[in-house]
Amino acid sequence: MNVPFVGLELASPIIAASGAFGYGIEFEDIVSLEQIGGFVTKGISLHPIAGHAAPRIVQTAAGMLNAIGLQNVGVEEFIRRKLPPLSRYPRSNVIVNVFGYQVADYTGVIERLNEAAGIAAYELNVSCPNVHSGGMAFGSDAGELAYLVHQAKTVSTRPLIVKLSPNVTSIANMAKIAAGEGADAISLTNTFLAMSIDAETRRPRLSNITGGLSGPAIKPIALRMVYECARAVSIPILGMGGITTPEDIVEFLLAGATAVQVGTASYADPCAVERLTHGLESWCRSHGVAKVTSLTGALEIPHD
C-alpha cells in the first residue's frame, strides 16, 4: 500500500482532502493519522478569516454545495496552536493548503510556514480571486497561474502541489503551465461552481448565492480531467472528486493518479479515509494486486 510521492512515503494512496478534515488534529481520536496517506489542512491565509454567514452548506441529490468562505485561524495561530499537537504523529504527512488574494499573500504564508517543523508539503489553492485582475481566479488565467506558481516555488523549501480549478476550458493546459513553472505535483479537481434555489421561498439556499459542488455527482467529470492531465504532464497527480468506495479509488489510479484525496465522504462518515484505506487494501488482495502503485496509469484502452 506504500506510495512514493514527491519525495514522501505515503502509508497508503489515500489522503484526506482540504476543507473536510479540519487541521487534522481534530480527527486524532477517530482516525489513525499514521495509517492513512496523509491529510491536507484547511486553507491557511496570512490573517484569520471568519468565512461566510450561514447557511453555507447545502445537500444536493448526489453531493453537496459549500460556501464556507475559506474560514481559518490564520498562519500565526496555525503554527502556534494547531501544528504542535501533530508532532505526536511523526509518520503522518501533513500537507498545508495555502491561499491568498494576491501573490504576496501566498508567498508570505509559505515563507512563514518554512520556519515551522512537521510539515510535509504545501498545496496551493489557485481558485482564489486575484485582486489585481479584478477578481479573476489565479487558476482560471494562464498567465496569472504561471506567475503565482513560479513565485511560490521560488520561496518554498518543501514540495509544492498545485490544486487546479476545474472551472476552465482546458484543465490539461493548466496542468502543463503548473508543471512548467516548477510544481512538484498537481491535485484535481477542486469544486465546481454551482448554486441551489429554494422554489418555495424563491431564494438561494446559500447565503453566498453560489458555492462549490462536490460529491459523487462530479466524479465522472473529475475522472476525465485526471485522465487528460495524466496524458499531458509527467509530474504526480492527486485525483479527487466524489470518492466513496475502494472501486472509485481504483478508477482514479487507473486514469493516471498517483494517489487520491477524499473530501465530501468525510462529512457523511468522519472515518471515511481510514475505512477506504482498509477497503482498498482488501480490494487489492482479492484482485491479486501486489503493489497498489501498479494500478497508476494502467487503464486499458481497447483498439479495434
Image (cartoon, rainbow, N blue to C red):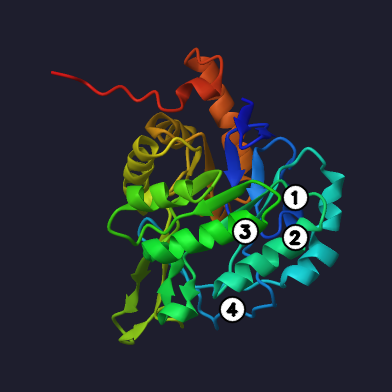
Residue mark closest to the camera, 3 vs 4: 3
Up the image or down, 117 lies above or below 1; here it is below
Up the image or down, 46 lies above or below 222; here it is below
**What x and y, as percent, mark residue 218?**
36, 52
Disc 1 target residue: 119
Identify the secondary structure beneath mark 4: loop
Identify the secondary structure beneath mark 3: strand
Mark carried by residue 113:
2
Disc 3 target residue: 97
Quarter that holds the N terminus: top right
Identify the secondary structure beneath mark 2: helix
Q: Could you tell which of marks 4 and 1 lies nearer the N-terminus? A: 4
Quarter that holds the C terminus: top left
Q: Could you tell which of marks 1 and 3 lies nearer the N-terminus? A: 3
Residue depicted at x 49% and y 63%: 147
**What x and y, as percent, mark residue 241?**
43, 49
Give 154 or 38, whichever is nearer the viewer. Answer: 154
Instruction: Quote the CA–CA distance across marks 2 and 4.
Output: 22 Å
**210 sits left or right of 275 in the view:** left
Disc 4 target residue: 51
Q: Could you tell which of marks 2 and 1 lies nearer the N-terminus? A: 2
Instruction: Quote the CA–CA distance across marks 3 and 2.
Output: 11 Å
Instruction: Quote the CA–CA distance across marks 4 and 1.
Output: 25 Å
Check disc 4: other Cα within 10 Å, few if <14, some if 14-19, many if 20+: few
Residue depicted at x 46% and y 24%: 295
User: What's the residue type where badge 2 is placed?
Assistant: Leu
**What x and y, as percent, mark residue 264?**
51, 54
User: What's the residue type where badge 4 is placed?
Assistant: Gly
Mark 2 in CB contact with mark 1 (< 8 angstroms): yes
Check disc 3: other Cα within 10 Å, few if <14, some if 14-19, many if 20+: many
